[in-house]
Image: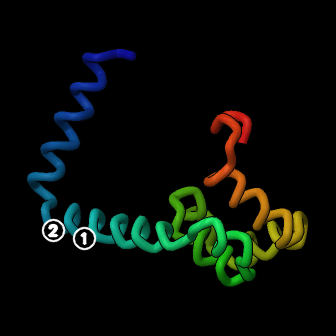
């Protein structure tokens, strides 16, 4: 890692936080809200997810930000893979016994 570059970006971010306190606070609160919602997905809930639950779990993710119609993308994911496989794979990803790399 380029430590000099890292420290430069860290300093720029710190300055941004100082000059944009309200926006930073709002963004942090939004992320905290998403984290709290995602923590509600225990293994049992993952294994019983509906299409709406999959949408609620995936739609706030940063990677979904580029999709204007998130329902289309998530519905396509469910149609392609099936809700059962998605339930099983999410439960395995978060609660499986294998190493994270294998899951």
Tell me residue 41's x, y (percent).
56, 70
Decide if residue 102 is on the left or right side of residue 14: right
Q: How is the image coloured?
A: rainbow
Work out whether residue 91 or residue 5 is closer to the camera in this orientation and state it. 91
Q: Position of residue 59 (x, y in %)?
A: 58, 71
Give the x, y percent position of residue 69: 67, 76
Instruction: Name the secondary structure under disc 1.
Output: helix
Q: Which residue is mark 1?
A: 26
Q: Can residue 36 be seen in this snapshot?
A: yes
At mark 2, the secondary structure is helix
Q: How many marks?
A: 2
> Are dots 1 and 2 in contact, CB under 8 Å?
yes
Residue designated by label 2: 22
Say left or right for 84 vs 57.
right
Furthest residue toward left: 18
- Pick the front one: 78 or 26: 78
Left or right of 54 in this view: 13: left
Residue drawn at the location 22% of the way across and 25% of the way down: 7
- The residue carrying pointer 1 sits among few (fewer than 14), some (14 to 19) or many (20 or more) residues within 10 Å by Cα, namely few
Res 14 quadrant in image: top left
Taking the spot 75% from the left edge, 76% from the top edge, the residue there is 72
Please determine whether, in this image, residue 15 is positioned above or below residue 69.
above
Q: Position of residue 77 (x, y in %)?
A: 80, 66
Q: Residues within 10 Å of mark 2 (few under 14, many from 20)?
A: few
Give the Cα distance between marks 1 and 2: 6 Å
- Name the residue located 88 percent from the left edge and 70 percent from the top edge: 82
Residue at 73% from the left image edge and 36% from the top image edge: 102
Residue 69 showing in the rendered view: no
The quarter of the rendered structure image containing the N terminus is top left
């Amino acid at each position: 890692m380029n430590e000099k570059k890292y420290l430069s970006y860290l300093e720029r971010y710190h300055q941004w936080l100082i000059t944009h306190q309200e926006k930073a606070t709002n963004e942090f609160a939004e992320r905290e809200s998403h984290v709290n919602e995602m923590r509600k997905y225990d293994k049992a809930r993952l294994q019983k997810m509906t299409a709406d639950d999959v949408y609620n779990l995936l739609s706030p993710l940063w990677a979904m930000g580029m999709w204007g119609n998130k329902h289309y993308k998530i519905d396509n994911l469910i149609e392609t893979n099936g809700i059962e496989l998605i339930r099983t794979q999410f439960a395995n990803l978060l609660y499986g016994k294998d190493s994270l790399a294998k899951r």
